[in-house]
Amino acid sequence: MRFLHIADVHLDTPFAGRSQAVRAHLRRASLTALDRAVATAVEEGVDAVLIAGDLFDGAYLSFETERFLLAQMELLSGDGIQVVYATGNHDPGEGSRAGDLAWPDSVTVIETGSPRTVAVTGRTGKTVGHVTAAGHATARETQDLSRQLEPVRGTGLPQVALLHTQVAWSGADRVHGAYAPSSLDRLRAAGFHYWALGHVHARQELSGDPPVHYSGSLQGRNPAETGAKGGVLVDLGDPAAPLVEFREFSPIRWEKLTVDTLGEARTLAEVVAEAAAAWETAREAEPGAEGTEWMVAVELAGPSPLWRQLRDPRELETIADELAGQLGAVGVEARSAKVHPRVRVEEHLERRDVLGATLQLVRAVMSGTETLGLAEADLAGFDSRREATLSSYLQRLVEGGSEEILVQMLDPEELSE
């Protein structure tokens, strides 16, 4: 059995707070990403497309999106490709538009927590595998739906589980609500050959044996969702040796850019030039797919003689507008919370007061000689898969902290220029 696993499409996301032109561009990008996913499914001759929840962003569905979505489903149906769609917390069975649509017969929508098993038939009409899934009946599903999913027994055919869930091991609890919470140990022991998961928007492989994957969102929606977005092409022709391949579908990528070389910049042109140079360096390292468009969150940081001006929201709007043109981006957000005056930390390290003691403590953390008596369990953001050590994580947290402390604690007249 071959299938395409996608999730978190979030059709008709409003993209509030952005200009009308940018909102329209981003909404079109979501449709383009789905179009690319469907085209890939057809080109690859898959047996099924699995949608692991949050196909819709909410109860609202524009007529344009409705027409487009059903046309895409008809394309898949016409090519003999089944669709199994299990609802998530954004598009639960209760109040979802999914139940109102005239889906083709090849589409199975699972809107409740009661598990259903769908036999997937290939182009010969023979069953090539089974997909067992459960959906979210409400927007706040608190039960572990994974415990109800069981593979079909007594068959050598591939068995796939489909679920929108927050796996405790995925380390995204601070970003995503713990809806339909599950444990990785339970998933791995259930007996399925592949778990197709949704809810976490970052592409993740939680297990290789058996494969447990978050496909990630189909198209990034905000500055936190950086990197390539798309779906996972899976071949279970030999369930003991699964082939899993990420495919990029998003036409727009969100990226973050830190610009901390503003020590000599004294004009708008010079600030923009520093940002453009940093962007060019970043794209040389990771150019993205051909034709990719960009949404960029620019973080201005470090010492600058323009620090007061750079913290003015009106000035940041001008910088963002200028950068969008320079970078050829769909949109740019400029932030400057980490910009500060040019200060000399060394001149204050020996002070015998609260400021001196605080600077010395930050210096000790940065050198790795102090961990503040903290353990890994004390830090919600610590992830041993990303951070080499607890000490390195703390160092990253307090990077630039000395300068920020000086700015907050010193009288403006004491700040060295």
Image (cartoon, grey):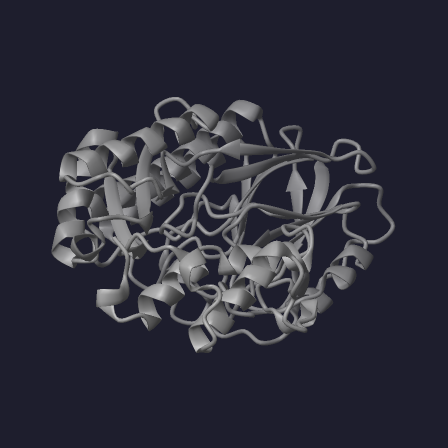
Query: Which residue shows up at 45% across the image and 28% down it?
Result: 39
Query: Which residue shows up at 29% across the image and 47% down it?
Result: 65
- In the image, farthest residue toward the right: 154
Query: Which residue shows up at 68% across the image and 67% down it?
Result: 376
Query: Picture quarter containing residue 409?
Result: bottom left
Query: Which residue shows up at 57% across the image and 56% down it?
Result: 366
Q: Is residue 115 above or below residue 332?
A: below
In this orientation, does residue 266 appear? yes
Q: Position of residue 245 (x, y in %)?
A: 62, 32
Out of 400 and 189, give the one closest to the viewer. 400
Q: Position of residue 174 (x, y in %)?
A: 52, 67
Q: Position of residue 213 (x, y in %)?
A: 64, 47
Q: Position of residue 14 (x, y in %)?
A: 26, 56
Q: How many discs mark residues in the rendered view?
A: 0
- Image quadrant holding the N terminus, namely top right
Query: Picture quarter containing residue 372?
Result: bottom right
Left or right of residue 218, residue 19 in this image: left
Out of 198 and 67, give the one closest to the viewer. 198
Out of 261 and 36, give the one closest to the viewer. 261
Q: Is residue 55 above or below residue 408?
A: above
Left or right of residue 313, residue 32 in this image: right
In this orientation, does residue 324 appear? no
Left or right of residue 263, residue 256 in this image: right
Out of 90 and 66, give the one closest to the viewer. 90
Q: Is residue 40 above or below residue 89?
A: above
